[in-house]
Image: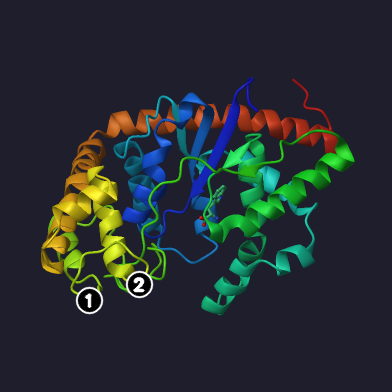
């Protein structure tokens, strides 16, 4: 709770660009949440350096992502969209929480195991304590809810454990956050393997449509989408590829599955794929155009970055000061 309003926090990495699945399944449904919640959408650049990054690329991607959120409809006056590295309370609280987190707990994190296998030459301490920084992100804003995918549930669990442990020792300091279960968006599957979710980290570039893919790329990926040999446009589990295309079409056009089936009655997979490609372009193109427009408006974006970092720091420091006092750090002399 912040100032009597429930609060919502989400962090996103600027590595790998957002997919159509991220947009239709999540982002698109977030644009009205500020009515109900004080919303924070943080570009977690500090988490990004747990894996080696090219500095210029990281800087550019972080800015692109921040702008993309605005272009996709999150009003930056009503949602706090900012960089983690601009609010020093994240790192400061993270240090304190490190002292309330056990090695054994962190050792169990599946993401740590996966990432250390993937980056065996750089298993750094930051990679190990990644979930603690994430806990700090969330707890700084007394977040009630956190929209997370299934892959981040374990990190949310450890956040809750750390918060409860701290509260048990020092009294009610942190709100214990819950996963945000809101209006569920469309669940979009990989275009190449419809048994898997569309993912920004998929190694096969044809499996995912990225929000910044140009129209030709989108059309090509849709045309290459895996279907089946049934040659029938039906909405059923036995035809997961076709089902996914119908879901995408429905999500992009706002038509119901029945309407989509009627529209493509008697038509072939080629027609469906072209239709889906065009529908996706009609959703993503305006966002891309807006992204291009905003990117040119440096003064406007810089203003948002500055104001929102100040707003985030205001709330974050309030929690941090409370925590510092609880653990026994000397009072500041004014
Ligand atoms: N670890 C998250 C991911 O990779 C990103 C993240 C960092 C996050 N801090 C967060 C997500 C706080 C939700 C809340 O997706």
Q: Quadrant of the N terminus?
A: top right
Is 109 above or below relative to 317? below
Q: Position of residue 244 (x, y in %)?
A: 31, 62
Instruction: Tell me, yes or no, if residue 68 can be seen here.
Output: yes
Q: Position of residue 159 (x, y in %)?
A: 69, 50
Indicate left or right for 221 with 70 as reference: left
Q: What is the quadrant of residue 323 in the picture?
A: top right
Q: Nearer the viewer, residue 222 or 183?
A: 183
Q: Position of residue 95 (x, y in %)?
A: 72, 49
Q: What is the quadrant of residue 184 in the picture?
A: top left
Crowding near pointer 1: few (<14 within 10 Å), some, many (20+)? Answer: few
Q: Nearer the viewer, residue 146 or 12?
A: 146
Residue under label 1: 230
Query: Mark 2: is the Cβ under 8 angstroms from ligand 1?
Result: no
Give the total number of marks visible in the rendering.
2
Is 319 above or below relative to 108? above
Instruction: Tell me, yes or no, if residue 328 can be seen here.
Output: no
Residue drawn at 21 percent across, 55 percent down:
261
Q: What is the quadrant of residue 79 in the picture?
A: top left
Q: Nearer the viewer, residue 132 or 59?
A: 132
Q: Earlier in the sequence, mark 1 or mark 2?
A: 1
Crowding near pointer 2: few (<14 within 10 Å), some, many (20+)? Answer: few
Residue drawn at 62 percent across, 62 percent down:
126
Residue drawn at 17 percent across, 52 percent down:
262
Residue drawn at 51 percent across, 35 percent down:
40
Distance CA(mark 1)–CA(mark 2): 10 Å
Instruction: Tell me, yes or no, whether the two marked residues, 1 and 2, touch with CB atoms within 8 Å.
Output: yes
Is 204 above or below relative to 248? below
Residue under label 2: 238
Element assignment for label 2:
loop
Element assignment for label 1:
loop
Q: Quadrant of the C terminus?
A: top right
């Amino acid at each position: 709770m912040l100032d009597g309003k429930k609060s919502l926090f989400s962090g996103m990495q600027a590595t790998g660009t957002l997919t159509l699945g991220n947009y239709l399944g999540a982002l698109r449904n977030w644009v009205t949440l500020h009515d109900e919640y004080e919303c924070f959408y943080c570009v977690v650049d500090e988490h990004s350096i747990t894996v080696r990054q090219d500095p210029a690329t990281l800087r550019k991607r972080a800015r692109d992502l921040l702008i993309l959120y605005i272009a996709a409809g999150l009003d930056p006056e009503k949602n706090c969209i900012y960089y983690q590295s601009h609010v020093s309370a994240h790192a400061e609280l993270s240090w304190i929480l490190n002292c309330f987190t056990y090695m054994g707990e962190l050792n169990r994190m599946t993401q740590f195991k996966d990432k250390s296998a993937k980056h065996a030459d750089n298993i750094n301490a930051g990679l190990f304590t990644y979930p603690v920084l994430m806990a700090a992100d969330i707890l700084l804003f007394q977040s009630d809810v956190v929209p997370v995918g299934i892959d981040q549930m374990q990190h949310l669990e450890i956040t809750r454990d750390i918060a409860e442990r701290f509260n048990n020792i020092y009294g009610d300091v942190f709100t214990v956050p819950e996963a945000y279960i809101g209006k569920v968006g469309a669940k979009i599957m990989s275009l190449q393997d419809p048994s898997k979710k569309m993912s920004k980290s998929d190694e096969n570039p044809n499996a995912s449509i990225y929000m910044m893919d140009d129209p030709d790329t989108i059309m090509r990926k849709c045309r290459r989408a895996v279907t089946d040999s049934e040659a029938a446009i039906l909405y059923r589990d036995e035809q997961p590829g076709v089902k996914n295309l119908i879901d995408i079409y429905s999500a992009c056009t706002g038509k119901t599955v029945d309407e989509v089936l009627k529209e493509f009655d008697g038509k072939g997979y080629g027609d469906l794929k072209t239709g889906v490609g065009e529908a996706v372009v009609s959703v993503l193109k305006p966002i891309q155009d807006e992204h291009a427009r905003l990117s040119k408006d440096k003064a406007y974006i810089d203003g948002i970055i500055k104001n929102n970092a100040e707003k985030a720091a205001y709330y974050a420091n309030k929690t941090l000061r409370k925590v510092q006092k609880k653990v026994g750090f000397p009072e500041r002399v004014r």
